[in-house]
Image (cartoon, grey):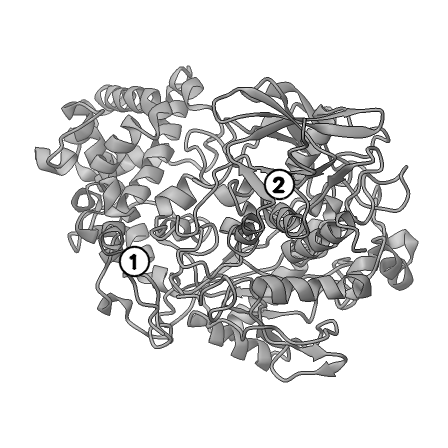
C-alpha cells in the first residue's frame, strides 16, 4: 500500500500509517479491486473515512482506534500475523466471522469502545467499517472518496445531474453515455438546463 | 406599550407555513417561530449530495438534541429510537421526525398527495356496517371524523390550485375521466398541471397491472410538471424524496407560502427559535417561551398561539406545558407500515432518475375497497410504483435477504443490478388503540433539561395481516412485470416511525373525548390552536400531508373569521 492511496495529497488527519494500512486492507476486502480496478482502494475509501472520523464522525474515534487494535491483536493471537499481512482468503475468513446478522448496532459508540466482549466489539466495528466503505465508494468526491468517480463508474451512476430528458428516461437507456458530474461541477457553473 | 403582534405561529412546515401566510395576508400581525433556519429561495441549488441529506440527515432534527424514545408496551423501559441511533448515527433519516427550517417536512417530502376517500372520514361506521362491531380489533379506539369529505372538498381544491399539484383527474362532478383514477372521489375541477414523467420501469408496472385487471393511474404529486405560480417545472434530477428541491419544483411551504406571507408586511420569522412551553393561565394562552439562537430564554406574548410543529412535538409541548386536562393528549398514536418491496427488472430502468411520485399507483384495494379476504384485513391500501429517485447508498442498504453485503459477489450484484432496481410499496392504515400512545419519558431529557417524548407502540395482528395480503398482491404484479428477484422488508418492520405519525391530539366535537375541535382549536385553552396530523382521528392508508394542508387552510379561515 503506498501513501498516496490512503491519504491523498493532504495525508491523514486522524489515523496513523499503521491504522490506515489495516483499514485499507479491510476496505479492500469489502469492495475488492478485482476484476475491473474499481474497488475501495481506487476510490480512496480510507481518505473518506479518515476525514469523516476526524470531523463528522468524531464520536467514533474511540471505536476505530480500539477496533483496529483489537483486530490486529486477535489476528496475531489466532493466525500469527496482523490483519494486513494475512492472505486475502484468510482476511475474508476473519471478516466473515465478524459479519453477524445479530450484531447490536444500537449501542452508543463510546459504550462499545469500552465494552468487555472483544468479539462483540469487533462485530460492531466491522459493521461500521462496512457501512463507511459503501459511503466512501458512492459519496460525492468532495468527501474524499469515490475518487475519479470509481464507485459511480462501477454501478453506472452519472452523479450530480441538473436533470434528465424524456429520452434519457426511456427503458434501456445507457446512462454511462452521460458525462458524470459532481457537486463541485455544479458549484462552479451554477447554471443548468432543464433538458426538456 | 404597543402590541407587536396578534398571533404566534410555532413551526413553518406543511400547516404552519400556510396558516402564518394566510393570517398575515388577511392583516393579522404574525410572529413565526421556527426551530431551524430561514432558508433563502435559492438555498438548495446544489443539493445533489447523498451523504449530506440521506446519510447524515442534514435537514432533520437529530436525536442528540431532540430525543424521542420508544417501547413496545407498558411496563418496559423505553430506548432512544433503536432503529435510528447506534454507532452509525443517523442511517435512516426517513424514519426520524421530518425536516426543520422554513418548509419543515415539505422541504424533503416525496410529495405524494391524496384526497381522503369519503369512507376514510367515517371509518368506524363503515367498518361496523360491513363487518359488524365484533370484527373491530380488541382495544381499538376507531372513531369517525367530526366532518366529511364534502366539508373538505373546497379546501382540497385550494391546496391543489393555490399551492400547485400535478395529476390526472379521474372523476369530475361524478363523470369518470379517461386515464384517471376510476375510484377517485368526485372533484369540482381537474388538476392545474398535467402528471409528471416517470422513470422507465413504471411502464412495466402499468402494463402488468392492466393485464391483471387493475386500474393504474398517475400519482397526484406536489411537484410542478411545468412552471406554475411560485413553482418551476421539475427537471427529474432524481434527488427528490429526502432532499430539498434545487429548482423549486417541489411544493414546499418555504416556496409557496412563506414569501407571500412576508410580502404582506405583517409577518416576521424568528429562526433557530426552539419553543419550550406554551404559557397559559385560567384557560387562556399568554404566549410562549423559546430558546433563541444564542441559547437565551425569551418570552413572547400574543392574543392567539398556533402550535404547528410536527404531531409528536406538538404533543410534547402540550404535555410539558401542563395542557392535558382530559388526559387525551398523546393518545391514539398511529403511523404507517410501509411494506417496501424491491425487485430487479430485466432492462436498464435508471433507478436514479425522476421523483418518487413520478409514478403510477393502483387504488383498487384502498380503504373500503379492500375485497373480502381470508387475512382479516379491514381497511386497504394503495399500491404504489417507485421506479426512480433512488441514490446509490440508499439502494446499497436494500439487498435481497441472506446476501452477504460485502466482497466480490456483492460488488458484482450491485454493479449489475443498481440501474435496474424497482420498488413497490403499500402503506397500510394503522388503527388507533388504547395501548398505543405518547407521554413524557421519565428517564430521558433533552440538552435543555426537558423530558423526551416517549412512544408506546407495537405492530398489531392487523398490521401484519395487511402486510401479508398486500405482499401477495405485489408479488403477482412483480411476476407479471418479469421480475425474477423480488424481496420485501421484514414483517413486522423494525421501525415505528414513518414520518406519517398522526392522531396524538385528536380532533372531535366532545371536549371530554378529544383535544381540539375540527379547526384545531384547543378545548382547554380558548386562544390556542394545535394543528397538523395530530388532529387525525384515524389514519387512512393515503399520505397525510395534503389533508394536513387542507385543514390548515380551514384553520386559517376560522382564525381570520372567514368561516
Which label lies toward us, 2 or 1?
2
Percent x, y of residue B365 = 70, 67
Viewer-closest of A189 and B411? A189
> The numbered mark 2 sits on a residue in which chain?
B
Identify the residue at image location x=64%, y=80%. Answer: B213
Viewer-closest of B388 and B511? B511
Per the rendering, the mark at residue B496 is 2
Per the rendering, the mark at residue B361 is none
Percent x, y of residue B402 = 44, 48
Viewer-closest of B208 and B21? B21
Give the quarter of the figure containing the C terminus of chain A: bottom left
Circle 1: is it few (<14), some (14-19), or many (20+) Cα within 10 Å? some
> Could you tell me how far apart the alpha carbons at marks 2 and 1 are, in whole angstroms?
32 Å
Percent x, y of residue B468 = 65, 57
Looking at the image, is mark 2 or mark 1 earlier in the sequence?
Answer: 1
Marks counted in the figure total 2
Write down the residue under mark 1. B415
- Specify the quadrant of the image occupied by residue B391: bottom left
Q: Is residue B4 left or right of residue A76?
A: right
Identify the residue at image location x=58%, y=20%. Answer: B297
Amino acid at each position: 500500500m503506498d501513501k498516496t492511496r490512503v491519504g491523498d495529497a493532504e495525508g491523514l488527519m486522524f489515523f496513523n500509517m499503521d491504522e490506515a494500512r489495516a483499514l485499507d486492507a479491510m476496505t479492500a476486502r469489502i469492495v475488492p479491486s478485482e476484476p475491473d480496478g474499481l474497488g475501495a482502494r481506487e476510490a480512496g475509501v480510507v481518505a473518506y473515512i479518515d476525514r469523516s472520523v476526524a470531523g463528522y464522525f468524531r464520536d467514533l474515534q474511540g471505536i476505530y482506534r480500539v477496533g483496529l487494535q483489537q483486530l490486529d491483536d486477535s489476528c496475531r493471537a489466532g493466525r500469527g500475523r496482523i490483519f494486513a499481512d494475512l492472505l486475502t482468503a484468510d482476511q475474508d475468513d476473519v471478516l466473515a466471522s465478524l459479519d453477524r446478522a445479530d450484531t447490536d448496532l444500537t449501542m452508543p459508540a463510546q459504550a462499545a469502545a469500552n465494552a468487555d466482549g472483544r468479539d462483540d466489539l469487533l462485530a460492531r466495528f466491522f459493521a461500521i467499517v462496512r457501512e463507511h466503505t459503501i459511503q466512501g465508494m458512492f459519496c460525492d468526491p468532495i468527501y474524499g472518496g469515490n475518487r475519479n468517480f470509481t464507485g459511480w463508474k462501477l454501478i453506472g451512476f452519472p452523479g450530480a445531474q441538473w436533470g434528465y430528458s424524456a429520452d434519457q428516461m426511456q427503458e434501456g437507456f445507457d446512462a454511462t453515455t452521460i458525462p458524470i458530474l459532481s457537486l463541485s461541477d455544479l458549484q462552479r457553473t451554477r447554471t443548468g438546463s432543464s433538458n426538456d | 406599550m404597543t402590541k407587536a403582534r396578534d398571533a404566534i405561529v410555532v413551526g413553518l412546515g406543511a400547516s404552519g407555513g400556510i396558516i402564518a401566510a394566510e393570517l398575515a395576508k388577511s392583516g393579522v400581525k404574525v410572529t413565526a417561530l421556527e426551530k431551524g433556519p430561514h432558508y433563502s429561495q435559492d438555498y438548495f441549488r446544489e443539493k445533489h449530495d447523498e451523504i449530506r441529506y440521506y446519510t447524515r440527515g442534514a435537514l432533520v432534527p437529530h436525536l442528540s438534541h431532540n430525543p424521542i424514545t420508544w417501547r413496545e408496551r407498558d411496563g418496559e423501559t423505553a430506548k432512544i429510537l433503536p432503529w435510528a441511533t447506534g454507532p452509525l448515527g443517523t442511517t435512516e433519516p426517513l424514519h426520524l421526525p421530518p425536516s426543520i427550517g422554513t418548509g419543515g417536512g415539505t422541504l424533503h417530502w416525496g410529495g405524494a398527495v391524496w384526497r381522503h376517500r369519503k369512507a376514510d372520514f367515517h371509518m368506524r361506521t363503515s367498518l361496523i356496517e360491513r363487518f359488524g362491531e365484533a370484527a373491530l380489533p380488541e382495544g381499538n379506539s376507531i372513531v369517525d371524523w367530526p366532518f366529511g369529505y364534502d366539508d373538505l372538498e373546497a379546501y382540497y381544491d385550494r391546496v391543489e390550485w393555490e399551492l400547485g399539484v400535478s395529476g390526472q383527474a379521474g372523476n369530475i362532478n361524478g363523470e369518470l375521466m379517461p386515464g384517471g383514477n376510476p375510484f377517485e372521489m368526485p372533484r369540482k375541477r381537474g388538476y392545474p398541471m398535467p402528471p409528471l414523467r416517470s422513470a422507465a420501469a413504471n411502464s412495466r408496472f402499468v402494463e402488468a397491472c392492466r393485464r391483471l385487471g387493475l386500474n393504474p393511474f398517475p400519482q397526484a404529486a406536489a411537484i410542478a410538471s411545468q412552471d406554475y405560480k411560485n413553482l418551476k417545472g421539475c427537471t427529474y434530477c432524481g434527488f427528490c424524496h429526502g432532499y430539498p428541491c434545487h429548482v423549486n419544483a417541489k411544493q414546499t411551504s418555504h416556496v409557496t407560502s412563506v414569501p407571500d406571507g412576508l410580502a404582506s408586511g405583517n409577518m416576521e420569522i424568528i429562526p433557530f427559535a426552539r419553543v419550550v412551553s406554551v404559557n397559559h393561565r385560567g384557560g387562556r394562552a399568554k404566549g410562549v417561551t423559546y430558546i433563541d439562537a444564542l441559547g437565551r430564554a425569551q418570552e413572547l406574548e400574543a392574543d392567539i398561539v398556533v402550535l404547528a410543529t410536527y404531531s409528536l412535538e406538538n404533543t410534547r409541548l402540550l404535555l410539558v406545558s401542563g395542557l392535558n386536562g382530559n388526559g387525551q393528549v398523546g393518545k391514539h398514536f398511529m403511523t404507517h407500515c410501509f411494506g417496501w418491496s424491491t425487485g430487479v427488472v430485466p432492462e436498464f430502468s435508471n433507478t436514479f432518475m425522476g421523483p418518487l411520485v413520478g409514478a403510477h399507483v393502483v387504488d383498487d384495494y384502498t380503504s373500503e375497497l379492500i375485497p373480502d379476504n381470508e387475512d382479516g384485513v379491514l381497511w386497504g391500501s394503495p399500491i404504489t410504483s417507485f421506479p426512480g429517485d433512488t441514490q446509490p447508498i440508499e439502494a446499497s442498504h436494500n439487498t435481497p435477504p441472506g446476501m452477504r453485503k460485502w466482497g466480490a459477489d456483492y460488488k458484482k450484484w450491485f454493479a449489475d443490478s443498481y440501474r435496474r432496481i424497482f420498488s413497490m410499496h403499500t402503506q397500510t392504515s394503522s388503527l388507533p388503540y388504547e395501548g398505543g400512545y405518547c407521554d413524557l419519558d421519565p428517564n430521558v431529557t433533552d440538552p435543555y433539561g426537558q423530558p423526551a417524548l416517549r412512544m408506546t407502540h407495537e405492530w398489531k395482528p392487523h398490521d401484519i395481516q395487511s402486510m401479508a395480503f398486500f405482499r401477495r398482491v405485489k408479488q403477482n404484479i412483480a411476476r407479471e412485470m418479469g421480475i425474477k428477484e423480488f424481496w420485501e422488508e421484514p414483517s413486522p418492520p423494525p421501525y415505528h416511525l414513518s414520518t406519517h405519525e398522526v392522531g396524538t391530539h385528536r380532533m372531535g366535537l366532545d371536549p371530554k373525548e378529544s383535544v381540539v375541535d375540527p379547526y384545531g382549536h384547543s378545548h382547554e385553552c380558548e386562544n390556542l390552536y394545535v394543528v397538523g396530523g395530530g388532529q387525525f382521528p384515524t389514519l387512512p392508508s393515503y399520505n397525510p400531508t395534503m389533508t394536513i394542508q387542507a385543514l390548515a387552510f380551514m384553520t386559517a379561515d376560522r382564525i381570520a373569521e372567514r368561516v
